[in-house]
Amino acid sequence: MASTSAANPASPASPDTHNRKKLPSWLTNFGAQVVYGLIIGLILGFIARGTAEGSGLREFLGFTGSTYVGLLRLMVPPLVVAAVIVSVANLRKVANAARLAVSTLVWFAITAFISVLVGIGVGLLINPGANSSVDADTAAEPTNVGSWTAFFEGIVPNNIFGLGVNVSDTGATPTFNILQLLVISIVLGIAAVKVGRKAEPFIGFMESLLAVIQKVLWWIIRLAPIGTAALVGNAIADYGWEALGNLGQFVIAIYVGLVIVIAVVYPLVLKFAGIDIMDFFRRVWPVTSLGFITRSSMGVMPITQRVTERRMGVPTEYASFAVPLGATTKMDGCAAVYPAIAAIFVAGFYDIPLDLTDYLLIAIVSVIGSAATAGTTGATVMLTLTLSTLGLPLAGVGLLLAVEPIIDMGRTAVNVTGQALVTAVVAKRAGILDQDKWDNSANADLDADEVEEEAETPEIVQEIEGEDFMDRPRESVTSRQQEK
């Protein structure tokens, strides 16, 4: 036995293994590390708030936070292109792929409709516009305005990469239109399937590219606790509690609506689909927490897809289609709860009565209009689309800009949670969700003392590094459906 232990340092008798097992799970748990970053960020933020503008700590927090989000966004265009092309190619292995796509869109619409009803109900109950003492001088026309014409024009790509440049007084900034990237990628994926065997090298290259991109993304995601501390600290330093001011009731109304959606609506949907509620929220916690901190559905998309695949048992062939689509068009926070309450706020502030037809218009715009904001400043553009449809003053958007970063954190957390929820629900109802993987997957309660290999890294990262994405054997979704 002694020789076996010496020959195999990784055996249970190894001193190194014994030492690693002593690491408590509260140190290695990814969700816990994000919470620690949040606490540190709050402390640093209040310290920085007591310093002058342009101080070293404020500059450091701002630079670190923006750099982290920038690194996430940097990988989004190649990730979307590679993931969508591979997912379209892999959908040919899935029985009833068209039905899955339609079911996804239907559940997007159902949850969005319920969410906007929640927003309207909370808005009418609290009536934040009539009870606000916000200064009317802060009203200003928004710089970005959503419109149905712009949406349809935006679908047509300007170039093969869907890329562009924003030119301002401070210089030129590269941009990308995620909706155009989706259109380009879907077309290329369908074309590759139609070409057949000749396109196999192309599909193989995209699969390899996807694996490389995901590996780089997980390196970036390792830095999430640092990014969390910087982003939260910077938000506190810039806005603090004073930013709430006269808009306190509006902020409360938004967060009440968001809490109802995530704590009442989503559990009811999960119950209907036969998914354990607490198990789902334990698994989706990395997605929700990072969405809250980064305020970017696209930046969190890699985490969303990996969580749905590895923690929830959603087949890669379907998750790689549903998650990018959801990150673009599934926004219960930004496109349902927020525009409903904000529209009621603007109407109340200007003393403009709304009738049943107006509330129906809010619901319609929220259900089908979120795609019109794809690739832009989602919530603000979505609000302008809603206000213009109702005939309300667009200048009312300027009244709410002071608390935009504060409410955007909650909106994005709900967005990304809803994206993971619909993906899991559709997979469950279609009979393709791997229940064994769900039951055996690592979750937020992972005990590092019991699982040796996870003791070194956060479990959500370990899941990637312990098993290469493209090297593992794939089970056919079609065969899984037949087994069901």
Image: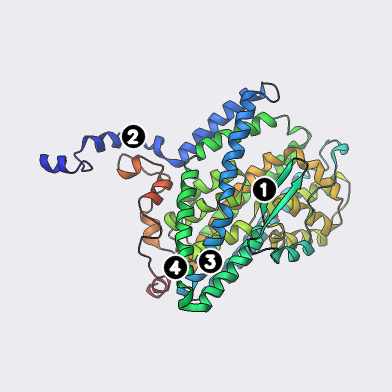
Q: Amino acid at mark 2?
A: Leu
Closer to us: 60 or 324: 60
| Quadrant in which the C terminus appears | bottom left
Observer-side mark, 2 or 4, equals 2
> Cα distance, mark 3 to mark 1?
36 Å
- x and y percentages locating residue 369 in the rendered image: 72, 61
User: Which residue is denoted by mark 1 in the rendering?
Assistant: 257
Q: Amino acid at mark 1?
A: Gly
User: Which residue is denoted by mark 2 in the rendering?
Assistant: 23
> Cα distance, mark 1 to mark 2?
40 Å
Circles 3 and 2: CB atoms closer than 8 Å: no
Mark nearer the N terminus (4 vs 3): 3
User: Which residue is denoted by mark 4 in the rendering?
Assistant: 432
User: Which residue is denoted by mark 3 in the rendering?
Assistant: 85
Q: Amino acid at mark 4?
A: Ile
Horizontally, residue 197 falls left or right of residue 189, namely left
> Cα distance, mark 3 to mark 2?
41 Å
